[in-house]
Amino acid sequence: MYKILAKRVLAQGTVVENEIEAPRIAAKAKPGQFVILRVNETGERIPLTMADTDPNRGTITIIYQVVGKTTALLKSLEVMDAIMDIAGPLGTPTPIEKKGTVICVGGGTGVAVLHPITRGFHQAGNKVISIIGARTKDLLIMEDKMKKASDEFYVCTDDGSYGHHGFVTDVLREQLTKLGSEVKEAVCIGPVPMMKFCSKVTEEYGVPTMVSLNAIMVDGTGMCGCCRVQVGGETKFACVDGPEFDAHKVDFEGLSKRLTAYVPQERQAMDRYEQKCACETKGK
């Protein structure tokens, strides 16, 4: 059993951070890798990328948004409650080496995935320029940690409530225009539309770009085949071949369609869970 040692509810109550006791995973985890957890005996297995790890404390940190039954059930757990199963670290680690200037772009909960990668590039001796964004200031996460892991740091909000009024692509284009060939790589992680448009911008400037397709994963082992994605005309599994891929080769249109494949079933499961919770509350 994996105990929750700390819990923080972030971003309008829909985004949650859990620090979990998992010493063996913490000792081996590398940037870009993920875990699969199961809340209880009857729960589904879901993949979540680690936002942070602390080998000395033997802990991993996950940040997730409540969007369905399993994440709602996970949020219901409190400090010192235990998660039944956690397997990891899984996935291919991010290839990190000293290259020069690297731009890291994150949106929404994708910032949690981006953080260990940003820190890894910074620790490798790169000049790291980070750009994070959200719809509004209240939805921004990990600002302090991302700033600490960066040489230059920019914040964007769609509504202008904080930082640059506009999209992360605006600041990304400004930096690429200013720095030109000095930028050796870009890493963009967040909602699929954000990654798609960031990829288009970096392609204009000929900058190699990496995106993370963790959002499409289901069972996380390559067995279910649900995370199939076309990369460079070849079929790849996000969980075992990735989750990171060359952004300029990803079929974002096909990816977007696959992400909506199970929406009706997800809604039904969430409705049943909410009804059950309502009945239990009424019974008390």
Image (spheres, rainbow, N blue to C red):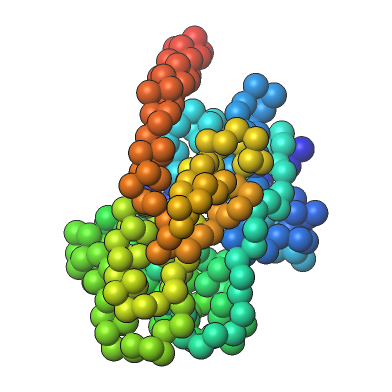
Q: Is residue 221 above or below residue 279?
A: below
* Total residue callouts: 0
Could you tell me residue 254's position as x and y percent? 37, 44
Could you tell me residue 76's position as x and y percent? 54, 33
Q: Is residue 59 left or right of residue 248?
A: right
Could you tell me residue 176's position as x and y percent? 32, 82
Picture quadrant where residue 140 is located? bottom left
Q: Is residue 227 visible?
A: yes
Q: Is residue 53 above or below residue 259?
A: below
Q: Is residue 278 visible?
A: no
Extreme-front residue of the structure: 233
* Picture quarter with the N terminus: top right
Q: Residue at x 60, y 66 (%)?
A: 94
Q: Residue at x 61, y 70 (%)?
A: 95
Q: Is residue 176 above or below residue 213?
A: below
Q: Is residue 197 above or below residue 176?
A: above
Q: Is residue 249 left or right of residue 51?
A: left
Relative depth, front residue between 240 and 30 = 240
Q: Residue at x 57, y 74 (%)?
A: 119
Could you tell me residue 240's position as x and y percent? 63, 49
Q: Residue at x 52, y 41 (%)?
A: 227
Q: Is residue 113 left or right of residue 264?
A: right
Picture quadrant where residue 56 is located? bottom right
Extreme-right residue of the structure: 24
Relative depth, front residue between 52 and 79 = 52
Q: Is residue 132 left or right of residue 220?
A: left
